[in-house]
C-alpha cells in the first residue's frame, strides 16, 4: 500500500471523467474496495495524506493563501463530494508538481 498508488489513483481519475463519476458518490470504504479491484493499492491513510498534500500545495503555492480558515480552497468544497472537488485541484498541478508532492524533503533545509 502506498502514497504512490493513491497519487496514481488521483491522476487516473483526473484523466478519466467516467472514473470520477463511478467513484464520486461512494463512501470511503466502497472507494477503497473498488480501487483495489481496479488495481490500486492504498489505505485510507495514504489517500488522506496525498489529498492533504494536494490541498496544502493549492493553498500555499497556487493560491498563495494563508493555511488557515480564510483560505479560498475550503469554501470551494462546501456542498460537494470530496473526490470531485479534489480532482479539480489535481488538475491545477502538472504531473511533475504532483510527483514532487511525494518527494522527501531536502536534507539540511535553509541556513
Image (cartoon, rainbow, N blue to C red):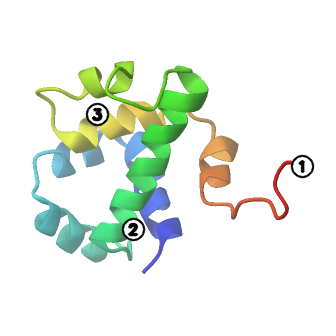
Mark 1 and mark 3: Cα distance apart in space: 37 Å
Residue identifier under label 3: 85
Residue identifier under label 1: 111
Dot 1 crowding, Cα within 10 Å, few <14, some 14–19, many 20+? few
* Foreground: disc 1 or disc 3: 1
- The residue located at (11%, 54%) in the rendering is 26
Residue identifier under label 2: 46
- The residue located at (84%, 48%) in the rendering is 110
Q: Is residue 92 visible?
A: no
Mark 1 and mark 2: Cα distance apart in space: 32 Å
Mark 3 and mark 2: Cα distance apart in space: 18 Å
Where residue 10 appears, as percent x and y from the top left, is 41, 51
Viewer-closest of 57 and 13 = 57
Where residue 2 appears, as percent x and y from the top left, is 47, 75
Q: Is residue 49 left or right of residue 20?
A: right
Q: Secondary structure at mark 1?
A: loop
Q: Secondary structure at mark 2?
A: helix
* Foreground: disc 3 or disc 2: 2
Viewer-closest of 89 and 14 = 89
| Residue 9, numbered label | none
Q: Is residue 22 left or right of residue 56?
A: left
Precedes in sequence: disc 1 or disc 2: 2
Precedes in sequence: disc 1 or disc 3: 3
Where residue 86 appears, as percent x and y from the top left, is 34, 39
- The residue located at (18%, 49%) in the rendering is 22
Amino acid at each position: 500500500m502506498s502514497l504512490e498508488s493513491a497519487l496514481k489513483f488521483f491522476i487516473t481519475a483526473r484523466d478519466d471523467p467516467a472514473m470520477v463519476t463511478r467513484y464520486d458518490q461512494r463512501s470511503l470504504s466502497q472507494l477503497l474496495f473498488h480501487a483495489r479491484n481496479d488495481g490500486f493499492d492504498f489505505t485510507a491513510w495514504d489517500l488522506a495524506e496525498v489529498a492533504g498534500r494536494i490541498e496544502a500545495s493549492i493553498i500555499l503555492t497556487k493560491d498563495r493563501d494563508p493555511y488557515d480558515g480564510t483560505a479560498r480552497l475550503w469554501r470551494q468544497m462546501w456542498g460537494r463530494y470530496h473526490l470531485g472537488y479534489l480532482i479539480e485541484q489535481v488538475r491545477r498541478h502538472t504531473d511533475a508538481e504532483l510527483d514532487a508532492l511525494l518527494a522527501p524533503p531536502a536534507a539540511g533545509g535553509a541556513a
